[in-house]
Amino acid sequence: MASDPQRGQRGQRGTNGSSGGGASDQTGAEDRKPQSDEAHSAFTPPLGVPYPPLPEDEHPTSEFALPAGLRPETPAEQEGSAFSQPSSTTGQTPLPAPVGATAMSAFTPPHGIPAVSLTKEAPWQDRMRTMLRMPVHERPVPERPERGDEDTGPAVPRVLDLTLRIGEILLAGGEGAEDVEAAMFGVAHAYGLERVEPTVTFTLLSISYQPSLVDDPVTASRTVRRRGVDYTRLSAVFRLVDDIASEGITLEEAYRGLAEIRRNRHPYPSWALTVASGLLSGAASMLVGGALLVFLAAALGSMLGDRLAWLASGRGLPEFYQFVVAAMPPAAVGVAFGLAHANVQASAVITGGLFALIPGRALVAGVHDGLTGYYITAAARLLEVGYLIVGIVVGVLSVLYIGLQLNPGLRRLNPEEALGAYNEPVVQITASMLLALAFCVLLQQERHTVAFATLNGGVAWVVYGALHYVAEINPVPATAIGAGLVGLFGQLLSRYRYASALPYVTAAIGPLLPGSATYFGLLNFAQGHLPEGLTSLVQAASLALAIAVGVNLGAEVARLFLRAPGVEEAGARRAAKRTRGF
């Protein structure tokens, strides 16, 4: 350093003084003296050896450097994850995709992503059932309209509330759990909620929505406390769901339509329901050989039972006691005619009254839920059917026991005399159609569906009569085949009208209900013939199950022949959502 020149001079003098030589030695030492401090480095070449030439590049190379003539590789794309957003949404510039690659996320299912074709020309029930049976990662993304920055779509709580309200009406009206879940999923999917899972049990509805795998789910539930039969309201809700899933109406319009459905009154007043109940029992008595007087007696007993059931309902009694009260008047009228020794088939009167009370609608719904994999709901519905049938048994048996105590030799109550092999095709076909017509009024159906359901009931009895009376086939398979045709035609009609199949099916199975077999079992129990009574009740249960299974099988046959939209590569219909099969 040049900041202290005097110190350099003192050092030079000390060096000269220590050498002890003359002037010539001093001159030679000065020539050999290094010119800078770099001469003390071990890497400095010795004296007389020339320095190597300086490299042209000022930056030294490394063994990891890319050789000349090679292009640097394109940086590899960062490994994708199911928990990360695509690169297009993070503000980064996406890397160029290789040739032949598709513009998809880095994560792909191991078996590929199937091609899904869900055209809106198909009924929404088929489309929603197809998506419900798919795994969550394979469901197609809902179509969203173009929105501005300030419009973020409907609020999630409002969509879930609308979904639960619609599901409540469907479940309370007797719709199957599979169709209720399909409707709830269709509503939520139409408003842009992708990851939704509806759950339906006998009295509880719940739906869960998860925006993504890393977000907390939002869950809402609703309890169905009251159940009523109104197929007009049920059909209106199906049309509303079709407008939501296919037409894309707004959330406000959907709420307005749902409010109008709730405000609408039943199409038939209470007195019309009472008359229809009597008409149903009278027509049922004609099926087993009753004449005009039997028709009037059965109608009178059923109307009295209906009024008593309404009174018990207004007092808040459970449904079990309502059925006990409703079953007593028809049995009392039959016993009264038998005690009076009138020329009236008392057994036909009681049998007609039982036709109006057997819960065929709940039975069909329970078996349908069991066959489609909803075992909790099916078990609850079948348990309800069991309680209602026990109520009917208690009401009829109490009256029959009193009548037999008053007159043990009541011949008019014996089924062998009263209900023989009655076979009058014209009378029975007319009675079956009249029974189905009365059933339509009791179910509060829309007027344009009454004619189809009435004809469907006539077809059911014609098939059953031809198989049982002409071909002499056992009544159980004959009933199952007749109910299968009812389910097939009902499913075809519902697809044609984009509506529920219940209005076309429930009333049509009325002529097939096991009223006479139930009466035989109860009468044998009242007379103390337990083996015969048990045999008759087992036959009645077999007929009831044949009806339920036949209706479900007919609907499934219709779906097999009518191609449902879904996964193109699969071709066949997938198994139910909760039972994947073997």
Image: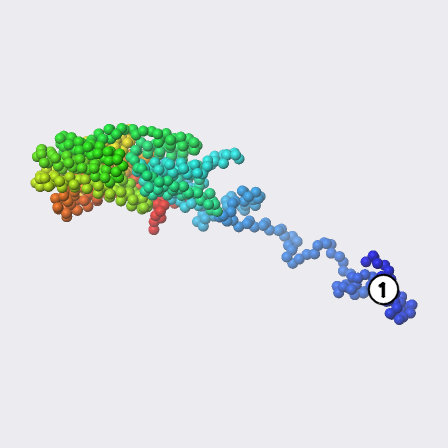
Residue 168 visible in the current orientation: yes
Which type of secondary structure does the marked residue at label 1 adopt?
Answer: helix
In the image, what residue type sits under mark 1?
A: Gly
Q: Above or below — where is 503 with respect to 571?
A: above
Q: Nearer the viewer, residue 204 or 512?
A: 204
x, y (%) of residue 171?
33, 38
Q: Nearer the viewer, residue 8 or 554?
A: 8
Q: Which residue is mark 1?
A: 11
x, y (%) of residue 567?
40, 43
Q: Above or below — where is 451 with respect to 579?
A: above
Residue 31 visible in the current orientation: no
x, y (%) of residue 201?
34, 43
Q: Nearer the viewer, residue 324 or 174?
A: 324
Q: Above or below — where is 213 with respect to 253?
A: below
Q: Look at 19% across and 32% down and name the residue there.
A: 304
Q: Nearer the viewer, residue 168 or 141?
A: 168
Task: State the residue lying farthest toward the bottom.
Answer: 20
